[in-house]
Amino acid sequence: MREFLMAIFMLISSCFSNLFTQIERLPENKYNSNISFNCITAEENEISEKEKQLCRSWFDEKLLLRSGSQDLPYDLKVGGKSLVKNINDWDVFVGAESDEGTVYKGGKTSYITLNHKLSDLEATVEATIYEKNATCEWTVSVRNSGGSDSPVISDFYAANTAFAIEEAQLYYSMGSCDNPYDFAMMQRCLSLIPSVFVSDDGRSTDINLPYFNISGKNGGIVLGIGWTGLWRTDLSAFGGDVFVKAKQENFKAYLLPGEEVRSPLVSVSFYDGDNPLKGFNSFRSWVSNCVYPENIPDTMTMLEFSGPMHTQTAAELFAAADGYGEEIYGKIDCFWMDAGWYKYNEGWHDSVGNWVSNPDRFPNGIVEVADYAASKGCGLVLWFEPERVCRNSLFHTKGAENERWLIELDDEDNLMWNLAEDGARDYLTDYISTFLKENKVTVYRQDFNFSPDVYWEYADKAYYGGRKGITENHYVTNLYAYLDGLTANVEGLIIDNCASGGRRLDLEMARRSVPVWRSDYNCNPHENILEATQSHTYGISFWLPLSGTVFYSESEYAARSSIMPLGLETFGTVHGEHYGEYIEQRSMMNGYYYPLSSGGYYSDRMLAMQYSSYDADSGMALVYKRADVVNGEYTVKLNGLVPDAVYSVYDYDSPENVFEMTGEELMKKGIKLALPEGEKAFIIMFSAK
C-alpha cells in the first residue's frame, strides 16, 4: 500500500507540478521574525556515531550502489528516456574510494562512471563523503565522447531523491537583495504541494539562500546547493518521506563531440533528533572545516584606502595615511582599494574592463600601494568586475577581436565577457593572474553588478544553436575554473566574493571565497541600518560562519552592532572611540551558533545570539536592546552548554564582576539584564572552569 501511495504521489507531482506549486519569494511587507528554537546540550550537539553511520549507509547505498540498489539520487533524460527508469541502458562502474583529503579537505572521494549503451554519452559522478561531519556531496558530469552530436539531454537533476523524515519542518533563509530583512530565517511545513525555490536573475542568492534545513520528529537533513546561476529546488512531503529535486533551472540541449556539462553540487548533512539547531551547527562546522579555503583566517579587517569616489594620487593617499599612528595599522590586515583605480569617464562604473591602473593617479602602478601597505604590515585588496565589460574599454577591444568572447545586447550598455568560451576564460585567467602577481595583490575582490540570465539566454540562440541553458552551464563551470586558476597561479591569494552585496553565496562560491560585503543595504545610511546589520548577522550565521560589512564605530551601540568576522574600516571611522575593538569576540563567531531572540530589524524587539567553541568551553552572547523596547529587563538563556559544568560569566562592561553558574542554570534560568532607556548592546562572556 505504501508503494502504491507513493506512486500515486509521484504521478500527481509530475503531471501537475505547475499547478501544485508554491514559489518562495521575498515578502511584500513584514516577515515572521518570531521563530524560536529549543535548548540543546553540548553533548547533543556533537556529531554522533549514529549520524555518521546514517550518512555512510545512505552514501554507500545511493551513490556507491554497494547494496545492489539502483535507486540513484540523481537523474537525467537522454532522448526523452530517464536514466533512473532505464538503468539497464547504462553500464555502471564504481571506482575505489580515495584517501581522506585527497580531493577535498576531510573527504573521501569516489567516481562512478555510467556509459550509455545507446549513444556515446558518458556520465561521471564525483561523490565525496565527510564521515566526521556526517555529510556527503556529489556532482554529475555528462560528456559526449563520440564523433557526432548526442541525443538531447533534459530534466538534468543533480538531486531527485527522498529521505525518511516524518512531520517535516523546513527552515530556509532569504537571500541578499538590498533589504533590511536580507538573510531572514523562514519556516514552513512541507506538504504534498511542492515548495519551489529559485534564483531570479542568474545570481544565485538574490531571492533565497540555497540552503535548507529539513527537520523531523526523529531526525533531519541539511541540504546545500552549489550553482552560481539559475538553480531550482523543489521540496515536498508525503507519507513520512521528504522529496528533494534540485537542478540548473533551465537545461535542454544536445552535446557536440567532446563537449561536457555538469550539474549543480548537492550536499546533504544528516542529523538525529528533533532539534534543527543540530543540523545548522553540523552544516556550519562542515563549511568551516571542509569547504572554506584553507588560507581563510577567522577574522579579517580591511582599511578603506581608495574608494569609488576618491580621486587622490598615490602620493596624496600616502601622505594622508602617514598621519595615522602605527597603532592603527596594528589592527588592520589589508588596505582596501575599491572600484575606480583604473581610468574612467564620468564614474567608476562606466569604464569597467580597463584593468590597467590610472597613470594619472598611480604613475608607478598599483604595486606602489601594495609596497606601502606591506611597510605597514598589511596586504592589499583590489576590486575587479571582470564579467562586465564597458564599451571602448581594454577588454572590449580584446573581446571584439575574438569570436563569441563578448555577449552584447542591443538595449544594454553593459557587455558580458563570455566565460562560456574556454579561450575567453584562459585569457582572463592569464591576464588577471599576471596583474595580481605583478602588483602584489593579496586579496582579489570580485564584484558582479548586473543580471546575467538575459545574456545567457541570448547567447544560447545566437552562438550555440538554440540549446537551452548551454551558455549558463559552460559559463558557471568556467567561472569556477577561472577562480581556481587565480588561486593556483597567485600563491596565498584570498578571494572576496561580492555581487551587489551577497548575491552569489552558494556552496561552490563558499569553496573558493568569503563575502566581506554581504549586503548592499549597508551602502546607504538607512534609519534602521544598525538594527538591519544585527539582523543580517543573526540570519546569515545559521549557514555561513564568515561574513562581513562596514564596521560602525561612531558609538558603542553602533560598534557592537557590527561585530562580525570580516569587515571594512573606513577613513571616517578609524579614529573612532571603538576602532579595533572586539577582535576576541569576532574570532569566536566561527564556532557553533545559537539564535536566542529573533527580533528581526524592528526597533521595538530584542535581538540576541550566541557563539560558542565546538567543545562549549567558551563563548559569548550578543544582546541588543533596541530604542523602542519597553521592557525593563531581559533574561538571556544560553544554549549548547555542558549542563553540569561550572561557567564563569561576566558582562563585557564589568569584567571585574564575575559570577559562576552551571550550564544547566544558564540554559534554563538564564541571566537577567536590567535594560536602560534607549539603545544598548550587551556582550556576555562565558568560559568553563
Image (tube, rainbow, N blue to C red):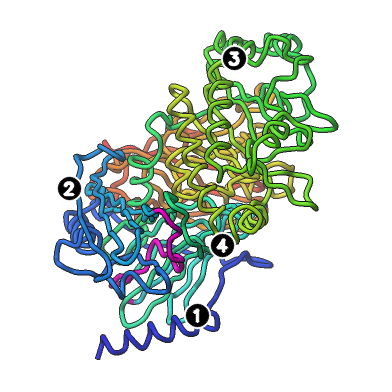
Q: Are marks 4 and 3 in contact (CB under 8 Å)?
A: no
Label 1–label 2 contact, CB within 8 A: no
Indicate which disc residue 468 carries: 4
Per the model, the C-alpha gap separating discs 4 and 2 is 35 Å
Q: Amino acid at mark 3?
A: Ala
- Tell us which disc is closer to us: 4 or 2: 4
Q: Which mark is residue 96?
A: 2
* Residue under the image location 20 percent in, 42 percent down: 98
Q: Name the residue rendered at 41%, 65% in the picture.
A: 157
- Residue of label 1: 17
Compare marks 4 and 1 and give the one earlier in the sequence.
Answer: 1
Spot occupied by residue 618 in the image (x, y as percentages of width and height) = 34, 38
Residue shown at the point (59%, 14%) measured from the top left: 370
Regarding mark 1 in the picture, which secondary structure is present there? loop
User: Gap between marks 4 and 1, in whole Å?
Assistant: 20 Å
Q: Which residues are magenta?
A: 147-166
Instruction: Identify residue type, mark 2.
Output: Ala
Please name the amino acid that badge 1 sits on.
Answer: Ser
Name which residue type carries label 4. Lys
Residue 435 image position (x, y, % from top left): 58, 21
Q: Earlier in the sequence, mark 3 or mark 1?
A: 1
Residue 158 lies within the magenta run: yes
Q: Which structural element holds mark 2?
A: loop
Quadrant in the picture for the N terminus: bottom left
Q: Is residue 528 above or below residue 1?
A: above
Question: Crowdedness of circle 1 by 10 Å Cα count: few (<14), some, many (20+)?
Answer: some
CB-based contact (under 8 Å), mark 3 and mark 1: no
Q: Position of residue 288 (x, y in %)?
A: 37, 41
Q: Secondary structure at mark 4?
A: loop
Residue that label 3 marks: 370
